[in-house]
Amino acid sequence: FAIIFRYSLNSSASYCHVVINFLPYFITNVFPKRFIEIIGVFVYYALSRWCHQIPFTAIMFLIGFCIGFCVDRVKPRNILLESSYIWTNIEGELIILIFLPGLLYLDSFNIDIHLFLQSFLQLVVFAFPMVLGGTALTALVAYYIFPYGWSFDLCMTFGSILSATDPVAVAVLLNELGAPPRLKMHISGESLMNDGSAVVFYTIFSSRFFYEFGLDGIGEEIGWGKGFALFFRLAFGGAAIGLAFGIGTVFILFHLDRRLSGEDSVIQVVTTISAAYLSFFTSEILAHCSGIIAVLFCGVTVKAFGETLLNNLQLTHHFWEITEHLLNALLFALGGSVWGEIIGDQTYTEGQGRLFARQDWG
């Protein structure tokens, strides 16, 4: 783009041609993200000054809902509506690759290693058998109470989606009440690990559900033995890959040890970024293991052995805090946009084959 732009300065006609042709692409791909980010600034300011009881992410979800709801209802179409439409139809795999590593790494890096190791066995019990139990109970409700006639494998898939808990509200309450640090670790550590276990269970049960369609290459018949083998491969394979990337990151941080060099400090931050995203990509895409568990163990390993090697710990923390804030704002706004588009699109809610009926809203 820089080369084209520079060349276009040779004539005003060429310049206008480049701007006219590039502007729709620029607005379509950049506008939604930057718009959400600046709106997030104003939302944060208002909530932090006057309404701090209201969660920031909830407001971003509602803003995204309004954007998605207007996509198919506002006429005539223009470039801004088109950009919102593309934004709400982003590929799910791309969302996972962009958002999850950045959000998971900071949580795992901020964990208290001493308490984490002390509570590890309890966290494993909470995050795996108890999440499976929650998945099964939710599936029973969907199977026997919901009026949809779902198969049990689909109900288990539905249960695995809802089984992962979000500790934000609970963590705030525990901090206000002065709860013991070990209890806080049980809540935050279990939440961090159950993201990975829920994805593992979803992978297993969704494969069983897709197999019911009888299409070649879609789904897989997974019995008890194969299910346990797949579970251990996803979980322990992801943990091993995360440990390997964590050790490699510590090795690189050790050699970037010039504490008076600002450039070394920046490269150390770049190393943590690369480790987070590469560990997720390697585990999830290349090795077909759990990318979430890989990022978790990568962050915990760097925290345990590499924190003292960081030349500028504040720089690293500030960068990841900025990243988490931006990704949270974008992710919740995107979720609201997708839901708003579904609700606003009349083809989803009208006609004989509608996806949403009155009973779906209680």
Image (tube, rainbow, N blue to C red):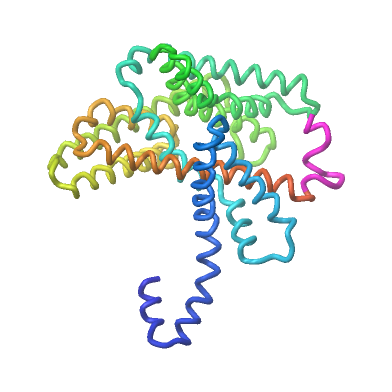
> 77 or 141: which is nearer to us?
77
Residue 325 in percent (x, y) is at: 45, 41
**Measuring 73% from the left and 66% from the top, which residue is drawn there?**
76
Helix, strand or loop for the magenta stretch, by majority: loop
Q: Quadrant of the C terminus?
A: top right
Residue 28 located left or right of residue 179:
right
> 114 or 247: which is nearer to us?
114
Residue that protrudes farthest toward the right in the picture:
352
Identify the image quadrant of residue 237. top left
Task: Give the magenta part as a residue range.
Answer: 348-362
**Measuring 69% from the left and 65% from the top, which residue is drawn there?**
77
Residue 167 located left or right of residue 85:
left
Residue 115 in percent (x, y) is at: 34, 15
**Measuring 80% from the left and 44% from the top, which residue is drawn there?**
349
Image height of 101 relative to 66, above or below: above
Residue 125 located left or right of residue 260:
right
